[in-house]
Amino acid sequence: MSEPESTTASHQHYRRSLGTISLTAVGLGSIIGSGWLFGAERAARLAGPASIVAWVIGAAVALTIALTYSELGSMFPKAGGMVRYGQYSHGSLAGYLAAWANWIAIVSVIPGEATASVQYMSSWDFDWAKGLYDGRELSVSGVALASVLLLVYFALNWFAITLFAKTNTAITVFKVVVPTLTAGALLFAHFDTRHFTDHGGFAPNGWSAVFTAVAVSGIVWAFNGFQSPLNLAGEARDPGKSLPKAVIGSILIALVIYVALQIAFLGAVPTADLANGWSGLGYTSPLADLAIAWGLNWLALLLYADAFVSPSGTGMIYAATTSRMIHGVQENGHLPSVFGKVDRRTGIPRPALVLNLVVAFGFLAVFRGWGSLAEIVSVATVISYITGPVAVMALRRLAPELPRPVRLRAMPVIAPVAMVFGSLVLYWARWPLTGKVILLMAAGLPIWAFYELRKPFAELKPHLKAGAWMIAYLFVMAGVSWAGSADFGGRGYLPEGWDLIVVAVIALAFYAWGVRSAWANPSLAAVKRELLETDAAPAPTRESAAVPQA
């Protein structure tokens, strides 16, 4: 399938104005959103003091997977990059499933950020504020306020990418300063070292709970932000250098901040609140509640303010990146052409913005609590991850001649390890959540069928053959999750310890199948031509290349 001429042309309307600093701010701004406001408490509730280890594991998983996507992003510096790579390596079926999983994971973050802001706001000492959240989900008034925030996120993306970049960089500075200040203030206010050994010990619920915390407590939710710079690759000035720096740098900076926050939280919890152990915690606004408990009223006020700034900054970024993803899905041939249009004057894909706004409202109506959205986002994210390790090695075989500004010699080792990590996190999410999200992935297939099943079978057959590994992978992983050890919600047919080995072996088997099944499909041929034409074009003059520093 070749890319429609109109959408290929519209791709040129993006403004390449984002440098390394702006892209790092995008990545860091995506990672430090609502996750830092709730993640420490939810991780501690599941894993106790071992939640520190959960953050390190989450960062290691994200970094390993991010390395595979950094090579792909530098090869194909196109808007909405994360939804394109599977299409280039395996054709329409695998490409669509990867794009669908990725889009679901990202677009649902936007209402999640709005929900987080309103949930923190419900701790304000006003009767109307307390009515915004009932302890489980937002009330009608809470949903209404969150809807207003959604409109703000999308309005800030409506006008120009340079306005977005300047606004986001300023917000990101604030988002880094406040969590750092929070960790320091709580450490100095109260730090009880006994919390790391009492109340069940360092890992009171066992190491299986630590692994589950990685998957569902908001850790994957947080580190998923590494992909935002990749989705804005079409607007990067020098993607070969800036993308890997932005992706890796944002993960490492965020890890330091999140570990500091987790340690501070664990030491600052009042001992009386641990009467029922770590699993008995139930704060509405965790960090602000601790600040008030230790008389840090100034910090509580700052946190209430940041509960708008941090999630709103992330929501604004994701509103931008999801619109580029929709553009990418349209260029893959699975949405109407209107969603491939980019405004010539501003460089913004406005129809895609509108579609994502509508879908975000839908998620907000169904999932009204941060926790429920975090679980859905995390599992969908992991499913979308598995195509990166497979695609990067498949494309080394199919397109060795394409320039790779980022090319790691260790990629033949990194890629299968990333596949194993992603599969383990999917399993750690516990049955039946894994099954529910895998079913959600299948719910997108009618859209693919509408566009693809009208083609002659001879044309469709190689796409089906190349995508069979991903369909089979989802079914097998659902089965393993159902049959797995009771520690991860399964029926107990797989003993503890052996279940992780089984998942790793399955991951490696599907990795090998996926790499072998890739083929030189029409989408890959089209992007090759586009890249060659871009390389052959005359270099811009100094005047025409000059853009404002974002």
Image: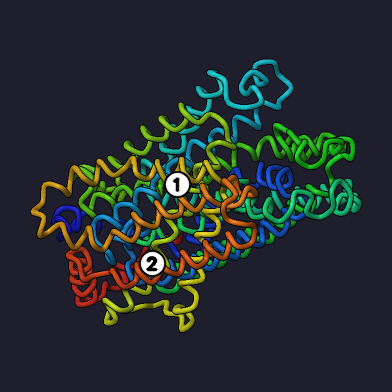
Residue 388 vs 108, above or below: the answer is below
Residue at image mark 2: 73
Residue in the image at 74% along x and 46% along y:
44
Q: Is residue 237 left or right of residue 52?
A: left
What count of labels does the image hold? 2
Residue under the point 42% across and 79% down: 407
The percent position of residue 505, horizontal first and vertical second, equals: 49, 67
Tag 1 or tag 2, which sits nearer the N-term? Answer: 2
Q: Secondary structure at mark 1?
A: helix
Q: Residue furthest top?
A: 127
Question: What is the crowding at mark 2: few (fewer than 14 residues within 10 Å), some, or many (at least 20)?
Answer: many
Q: Is 441 drawn above or below residue 289 in the view shown?
A: below
Residue drawn at x 25%, y 75% as measured from the top left: 539
Query: In this picture, is 28 found above or below 37?
Result: below
| Residue 337: x %, y % from top left | 18, 45
Q: Quadrant of residue 511?
A: bottom left
Query: Can you give x and y, in whole percent of width and height, for residue 364 in the image?
Result: 47, 30
On the question of residue 229 being in view, the answer is yes
What amino acid is labelled 1 in the image? Ala
Q: Is residue 29 visible?
A: no
Q: Amino acid at mark 2?
A: Gly
Instruction: Evaluate if marks 2 and 1 touch, with contact meaning CB atoms under 8 Å apart.
Output: no
The circle drawn on residue 340 is none
Q: Which residue is mark 1?
A: 105
Pointer 1 local density, CA inside 10 Å: few below 14, some 14–19, many at least 20? many
Give left or right: position of 34 versus 303. left
**Residue at mark 2 to residue at mark 1: CA–CA distance:** 19 Å
| Corner quadrant of residue 516 | bottom left
- Residue 455 appears at what percent x and percent y? 10, 51
